[in-house]
Amino acid sequence: MTLAPDAIAAAVKAGLQAALETTGGANASYIPYLAGVPSGLCGVCAVTPDGQLFEAGDTRHGFAIESISKVFTLALALEQSGREAVRAKIGARPTGLPFNSVIALELHGDKPLSPLVNAGAIATASFIKASGREDRWSQILGCYRAFAAAELPLSKEVNESEQATNLHNRAIVWLLASAGNCFCDPPEALDVYTRQCSVLVTCAELATMAGTLANRGVNPVSKTKVVSPGNVPPILAEMAMEGLYDTSGDWAYEVGLPGKSGVGGGVMAVAPGKLGIAAFSPPLDPFGNSVRAQKAVRTVAGALGLNLYAA
Ligand code: GLU
C-alpha cells in the first residue's frame, strides 16, 4: 500500500519535533573534525519510491557519511562479484562487538564477518575490482553519487582529520592482511576506506540513497538502476544484523526496519517498497549512534506503521 503524502509529511514533522525534545549524547571526539560540528544541528527526511521528498529541520547541511558509506561500498562489491563471493570473503554475520573491535577479528581467525564493521568495510573496499588506488576510489565515489543522484563531495577537511588519526584502523588493516583478508595493498585499502568515510551528504541526499534501496535498487529521483534488485535483500539483511553496531538488536526490536548509522550523526532506514528515511544530528550514544537521529527515524517509522515484523 502506498503511503499518503500528508501522512509522510506529518510523520517527518513529528520526527523532527521528537528529536528536538531528546537530549543527551556527545559528538564523536576520536576524529577531531567531528568534535567541532555544531551539536544542535538536526534534520529529518523521507523519500518515496516515486521520488517525492519530505523534509524538516537542517536537511541541507552536509555532514560526514562515515560508517553509512559501508552499505554503498558493499552494494558495489555485490554488483561486481556477486553475493556468494562477498559472503565467502567478508562474511554475513553480526560480530556482537563494537564497530572497531580488534577482539572480533582475533576471535574469528582475522575474518571480519560483517561488511558493516570497520574491518569488514576495509576488506570490502579492498575487494572492489580496480586497476589501482584512484580507480578504486573513483568507482566507489561514483557508486555513492549514483545512489544519491547528487555530486557528493569528498571533504578535504574531514579526510585530513581522519587520515591523521586513523591509527586504530591501521592496526585493523594489517591484521586483515596478515590473514589474507585484505585484497589489495593494505595502505591503499585504508586510504580509500578513510576517504569514503569523509564524503559529505545532506539528510535529503541520504534519504534518496535509502530510497534507492527501498525502490529495488532504482534511484527514485534519477530513475537510474544503481544496484540489481537481487542484491538489495542481502544489503538490507546486513543492515538489519549490524547497522546500528552493538545495539542493532534493540533497533530491530523497537523500529523493525533495516538501518545504518555513522559517527558523523547520520542514521538511515529502509522500508522496502515504501520509503527511504534519513536523519542527522551529531551527538552520539555510547555505541556510536546519533541519539536524536535514532529518535527521529523511530518516530517516522512508528507514525507510518512501517515495522516489517508487524502484520
Ligand atoms: N571513519 C570512522 C572510523 O573508521 C567511521 C566509523 C563509524 O561511523 O562507525 O572509525
Image (cartoon, grey):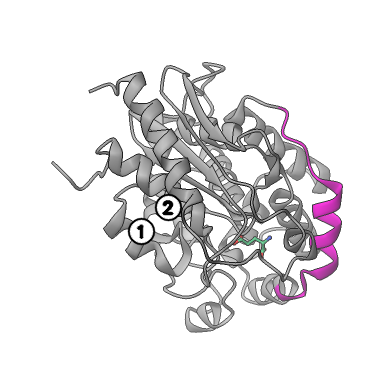
Residue 26 or residue 52, whichever sits in front: 26
Residue 127 or residue 156, whichever sits in front: 156
89 to the left or right of 234: right
Q: Main secondary structure of the magenta part?
A: helix
* Residue 174 part of the magenta segment: no
- For image coordinates 41% across by 67% down, the residue present is 247
Which quarter of the picture shows residue 282? bottom right
Please state the horizontal and vertical placement of residue 237, each as a whole percent of the image: 37, 50
The range drawn in magenta is: 151-168
Residue count near mark 2 (Cα–Cα under 10 Å), binned few <14, some 14–19, many ≥20: many
Quarter of the picture containing the C terminus is top left
**Tag 2, which secondary structure?**
helix
Amino acid type at mark 1: Trp
Please state the horizontal and vertical placement of residue 155, each as a whole percent of the image: 81, 45
Where ligand 1 lies, by image quadrant?
A: bottom right
Q: Which mark is residue 295?
A: 2
* Residue 160 part of the magenta segment: yes
Which quarter of the picture shows residue 252? bottom left
Please state the horizontal and vertical placement of residue 190, each as a whole percent of the image: 74, 61
Q: Which mark is residue 251?
A: 1
Query: Mark 2 and mark 1: span between their CA atoms?
Result: 11 Å
Amino acid type at mark 2: Lys
Ligand 1 within 8 Å of disc 1? The answer is no
271 to the left or right of 157: left
Q: From this viewpoint, is residue 281 visible?
A: yes
Residue 93 or residue 62, whichever sits in front: 62
Badge 2 or badge 1: first in the primary sequence:
1
Please state the horizontal and vertical placement of residue 8, each as a whole percent of the image: 37, 28
161 to the left or right of 87: right
